[in-house]
Amino acid sequence: MSERSLTEALLGLNYPARAAFATAAAERCVARAENEDSDYHDQAQPDALTMACLSAISDIWSGLAVDPSAFSRVSHAVASFYLTPLWRSNYVDEPSKASEAGGQVHVQSALYAALTFLHGSADLAARAALNANQFGSGERERQPRDLAFLQTRGDALLLDPTGSTGDERAAARNIIDDLRAGT
């Protein structure tokens, strides 16, 4: 699926469903990156950039399950990303390094998912998914299924913790669990 057609399809989803789509793709991308043989694994501990973006995935899922404090945590994760020296050296000074740095593709995907959660952008959701495609391994086949799943069930995802009932929060958690499980 091209970036344009994916973006157009994502425009048909509500804001939280777009965030769920991007986060599911980013989460799979991170899982695959952790299993890859790369310089990423040679580090004793993941860098601040990686830690900030990876923790955002968990916080996004919490926010989509209607956790009122998740928006703030995801905002802080994005801010942490922008404050790292790696942002400056890899993305500002030499933008071409960002696409060449295969070990950072998963970080880019997580960042796009976090920004989608914060802003609801279909373009950012598409970028999260397209970055995840770089790791292959069934991702291109999985995304249309995720999209179809969210087109039928995504409207039940809410981002208003104050106006939602216990049943609505449970329904949102079920959708997230099903999406993450691939059902």
Image (cartoon, rainbow, N blue to C red):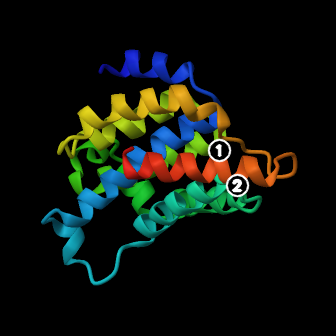
- Residue at (55%, 20%) from the top-left corner? 11
Query: Which residue sits furthest right?
Result: 162
Q: Which residue is mark 2?
A: 71
Q: Amino acid at mark 1?
A: Leu
Q: Is residue 92 visible?
A: no
Does dot 1 land on a helix, a strand or a loop? Answer: helix
Residue 166 horizontal/vertical position (percent) = 78, 55
Q: Are marks 1 and 2 in contact (CB under 8 Å)?
A: yes
- Residue at (39%, 54%) from the top-left corner? 27
- Residue at (71%, 52%) from the top-left corner? 169
Residue 134 or residue 67, whichever sits in front: 67
- Residue at (49%, 27%) from the top-left corner? 123
Query: Which residue sits furthest bottom?
Result: 44
* Badge number at residue 162: none
Q: Which residue is mark 1?
A: 118
Residue 16 horizontal/vertical position (percent) = 62, 38
Residue 70 or residue 47, whichever sits in front: 70
**Snapshot quadrant of residue 156:** top right
Residue 72 horizontal/vertical position (percent) = 72, 59
In the displayed structure, 123 sits above or below 68; it is above
In the displayed structure, 58 sits above or below 179; it is below
